[in-house]
Image: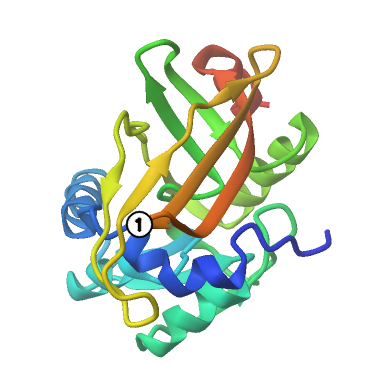
Amino acid sequence: MQQVETFPEEVAQIYDTIMGYFDYRKSAKIIDDILKNRLPGVANPSILELGIGTGALALELIALGYEVEGIDHSSGMLARASKKGLHHLYHDNVIDFDLGRDYHTIISHAGPLRMDYTPERGHFFETYLTSKQELKQALQNVSTHLKQDGIFLMSVQNTPGSDKKMRSTPEYGELGEFVAKKDITDNGNRRIKRRELWKGDQLIVGITHQFLVWGLEEFNELASL
């Protein structure tokens, strides 16, 4: 499968600022609690993160004693993760990756495979992938890379209902709002999200993503095939 750079270089440059409101330490602690409960006999379970990005979550997990590797289809994101001292980073996608080993845990934290929630829809599954067949391939690939009795963890997002105030960056100084534009839904199983980062009246970067969406029952059927 051809690599698709979902996040352009200008987004990779300021990604940590855009996501600066997110509590990665809290997420890492939740994952730590789950693994200690589900894998009590495993010391330092190995973790593969799908969509590792700039490595913010991975660094928190490493601080807790975990071995973390990661894949991402954005070379810009991986370059920034590498600068933070992360190793075992792979420029790949969830459909085709073949790392030649298996893991105790695979994580997709706000990554290519994830759950979301809105008051209108309730909980649902969404993905950057473009077809049901690609999703089935990705889930099979995840299964192939899991050890026996391994665990696949997906985050549950809560789509923000308001704009986020950003921290300052070396590139742009003090930034303004990260504006969440209204989602556009097509036929109930497709979402288009538009996000824009502004400094005053200057648009710094805009991101438009298209997601395929499934309800929980349909996703569970796909995952069990």
Quadrant placement of the N terminus: bottom right
Seen in the image, is 69 located left or right of residue 185? left
Quadrant placement of the C terminus: top right
Seen in the image, is 182 located left or right of residue 144? left
Viewer-closest of 101 and 173:
173
Residue identified by numbered label 1: 200
Whole-percent x, y for residue 138 in the image: 67, 45
Residue at 27% x, 61% y is: 42
Residue at 38% x, 71% y is: 55
Viewer-closest of 119 and 170:
170
Whole-percent x, y for residue 156 in the image: 36, 34
Above or below — where is 136 with respect to 85? above
- Numbered disc 1: secondary structure: loop
Residue 103, visible in the rendered structure:
yes
User: For mark 1, does the 10 Å Cα neighbourhood hold few (<14), some (14 to 19), or many (20 or more) residues?
Assistant: few
Above or below — where is 52 with respect to 85? above
Q: Amino acid at mark 1?
A: Gly
Residue at 43% x, 79% y is: 81
Viewer-closest of 120 and 195:
195
Whole-percent x, y for residue 218 in the image: 60, 15
Residue 214 position by quadrant:
top right
